[in-house]
Amino acid sequence: MNWIVAGLIAGVVAYVVDYVMWGKVFTKGMDAFAVMPAAGQAVQMGPMLAKSAVLALLFGLVFALIYAQLRNSLWVAAGPLAGMELAAVLWLPLAFCNVGSGVWYERARPLLMAQFWSWLARMTAAGLVVGLLMT
C-alpha cells in the first residue's frame, strides 16, 4: 500500500488513541496543567480537536514515510512487529526526555508521565497500522 494512505490511516488511529488517552485515561489531576478560559467563556473544543486532528495526520504521514525509508534496516522483516519495532526506536528519545525532565521539574512529573504513556500508546498504534498496511 502507498505510504501516504497508510500514514493517513495511521494518523486517524493515532488521533483516536490520543483522544482516548487524554479524554478518558488521564483525567484526574491534569486540571492543574490546563489553561482555563476567562470567567463566563466556554471552552472552545472544536478548534482544539481540529488542531489535534491535523497534528495526528501529520504524525501518521511522517511515521509512514520514516517506515518506508527504514523498512529494510529493521530487524523484523515486515508486518505489524516491524512497525512496532520502529515505533519503539522512535519512542525511546521521547521516553528519556520525559523521564529526564521529571527529575528537574517535580511539579510537572504527572504531566510528563502522562506524555510518556500517551506517546507510547500513540506510537505503538501507528506502528501496528503502518506495519500491517505496508507489508
Image: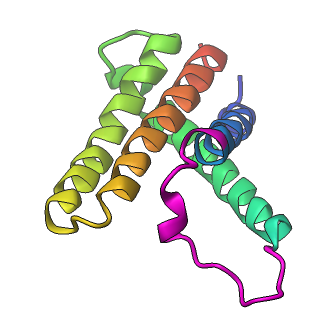
Q: Is residue 68 above or below residue 49?
A: above
Horizontal side, residue 25 vs residue 123: left or right: right
Q: Quadrant of residue 97?
A: bottom left
Q: Residue at x 32, y 49 (%)?
A: 94
Horizontal side, residue 103 vs residue 25: left or right: left
Q: Is residue 23 magenta?
A: no
Q: Residue at x 65, y 40 (%)?
A: 24
Horizontal side, residue 98 vs residue 68: left or right: left
The quarter in which the C terminus is drawn is top right
Where does the image place residue 118, in percent across and percent down from the top left? 48, 42
Tell which of 83 and 100 is nearer to you.
100
Q: Residue at x 32, y 64 (%)?
A: 108
Q: Quadrant of residue 134?
A: top right
Q: Is residue 113 above or below residue 103?
A: above
Tell which of 66 and 9 is nearer to you.
9
Color theme of the render: rainbow
Residues drawn in magenta: 24-43
Where does the image place residue 89, in percent across and percent down from the top left? 31, 34
Tell which of 99 and 134 is nearer to you.
99
Q: Is residue 5 above or below residue 36?
A: above
Tell which of 91 and 102 is nearer to you.
102
Horizontal side, residue 40 vs residue 1: left or right: right
Q: Residue at x 44, y 12 (%)?
A: 81
Where does the image place residue 35, in percent across and percent down from the top left? 59, 78
The quarter in which the N terminus is drawn is top right
Q: Is residue 32 magenta?
A: yes
Q: Main secondary structure of the magenta part?
A: loop
Number of callouts: 0
Where does the image place residue 120, in percent across and percent down from the top left? 43, 35
